[in-house]
Amino acid sequence: FRNRIVVSPMQTYSSTSAKPSAFHLVHLGRFALGGAALVSVEATAVCPEGRSTTHDLGLWSEEQADAFRPITDFLREHGAASAVQIQHAGTKSACRPPWRGFGPLQEDDAQRGEVRWEAWGPTSAGWSPAYPPSHPVQRADVDYLLNCYRRATRLAHRAGFDVVEV
């Protein structure tokens, strides 16, 4: 069944410094060992302010790309292609991780080192009334985001991914 199984795990919120770790190698590698033909990495932010939480993966630096390389190598060695989903969380960014309620980051989060950043959106309206206002995206921001996606795509190639999903 190897050529019929595609695995795309959900976000795991298991990163520090937006880099993959041994957790990700084991979590994703087990799907290759189980016969998956394609294993896709969860929503991976193209820039720091594009993360949903401080525990999200990112792909905006060479250091992050290099940290993904052992994972893509492992998947390939065990017969699976690798994919990465790159994204910007928009108005759903700057949130607490699910185990703290997935609401907007607060002052007590900042005391733990999880400092809030401004979410981006089409208007200044937050994701919901419970969320702070968003940074309304302007033309210069669109150019910045396009460059972030381009860079993340190049870094995905450096990391050894076979597929990039936008």
Image: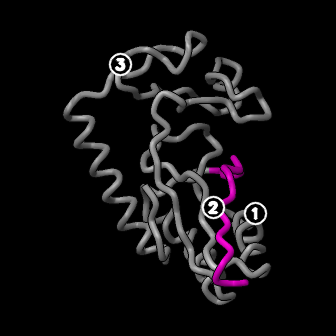
> Residue 58, image x and y in percent?
52, 53
The magenta region covers: 1-16
The numbered disc on residue 118 is none
- Label 3: state its secondary structure: loop
Residue annotated with mark 2: 20
- Label 1: state its secondary structure: helix
* Badge count: 3
Question: Quick one: 60 or 120, which is closer to the camera?
Answer: 120
Residue annotated with mark 1: 23
Question: Quick one: 131 or 9, which is closer to the camera?
Answer: 9
The numbered disc on residue 123 is 3
Q: Is residue 166 left or right of residue 100?
A: left
> Residue 164, image x and y in percent?
45, 65
Report, in whole angstroms, how far the alpha carbon at label 1 lies from the one at label 2: 7 Å
Q: Mark 1 touching mark 2, by CB under 8 A?
A: yes
Q: Mark 1 touching mark 3, by CB under 8 A?
A: no
